Amino acid sequence: MVPSGKAFDALVAEEQLTDPSFKAEWQRLAPAREFAATLLRYRAEHKLSQRALAQKLGVSQPRVVKLESGDHNPEVDTIINAVRRLGIEFALDIAPANRKPTLVTARAQRNGAIAHNEVSVVAASSV
């Protein structure tokens, strides 16, 4: 149960401080969460159901559920398919952790890079 008065971000930060395995998994799935948020924003902006988004993507509705969960990093082919079919932009910049990402926009950089196994990962979208 979530303690009242604590924001989700604060709970995640607290958990990362106390559980290294949670932190590693949270960082590893950063691209999945950004891709999921991108699909959710697209669906909301276009007033689409999951079934309608699935049709646009050429996948099943359960596949959309999985992609929107953010629990699994999508394959590159899945991202390419979404970009092509939805007309969106999605960027993923992976660089050594000791170097600031340079291939993504300032907006994406403000959202922050996630360090993961000695690399920095920044994911951003146009949606």
Image (cartoon, grey):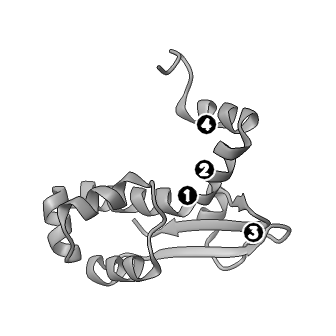
Secondary structure state at the residue bearing disc 2: helix
Callouts 2 and 4 close, C-beta under 8 Å: yes
Q: Tell me the tag on residue 26.
A: 2
For badge 3, the amino acid type reads Val
Left or right position of 47 against 87: left
Label 4 residue SS: helix
Q: Give the residue type that dot 2 points to.
A: Trp
The secondary structure type at the circle numbered 3 is strand
State the SS at label 1. loop
Q: Which mark, by number, is residue 12?
A: 4
Q: Quadrant of the C terminus?
A: bottom left
Residue position for label 3? 119
Q: Of residues 113 and 47, which is closer to you in this image?
A: 113
Q: Earlier in the sequence, mark 3 or mark 4?
A: 4
- The Cα–Cα distance between marks 3 and 4, rounded to whole angstroms, is 20 Å
Q: Answer with left or right where residue 125 lies relative to residue 106.
A: left
Q: Residue furthest front?
A: 21
Q: Amino acid at mark 1?
A: Leu
Q: CA distance from mark 2 to mark 4?
A: 9 Å
CB-based contact (under 8 Å), mark 1 and mark 4: no
Q: What is the distance, in whole Å, between disc 3 and disc 2 at their CAs? A: 14 Å
Q: Quadrant of residue 99?
A: bottom right
Residue found at x 46% / y 60%: 72
Give the alpha-carbon distance from disc 1 to disc 4, as whole Å.
13 Å
Give the percent coordinates (x, y) of residue 13.
Answer: 67, 36
Circle 2/circle 1 CB separation < 8 Å: yes
Total of numbered circles in the picture? 4
Say which residue label 1 marks: 29
Where residue 112 appears, as percent x and y from the top left, is 67, 57
Does residue 31 show up? yes
Q: Position of residue 96 (x, y in %)?
A: 79, 73
Given contact means CB atoms under 8 Å apart, are the residues at marks 3 and 1 in contact?
Answer: no
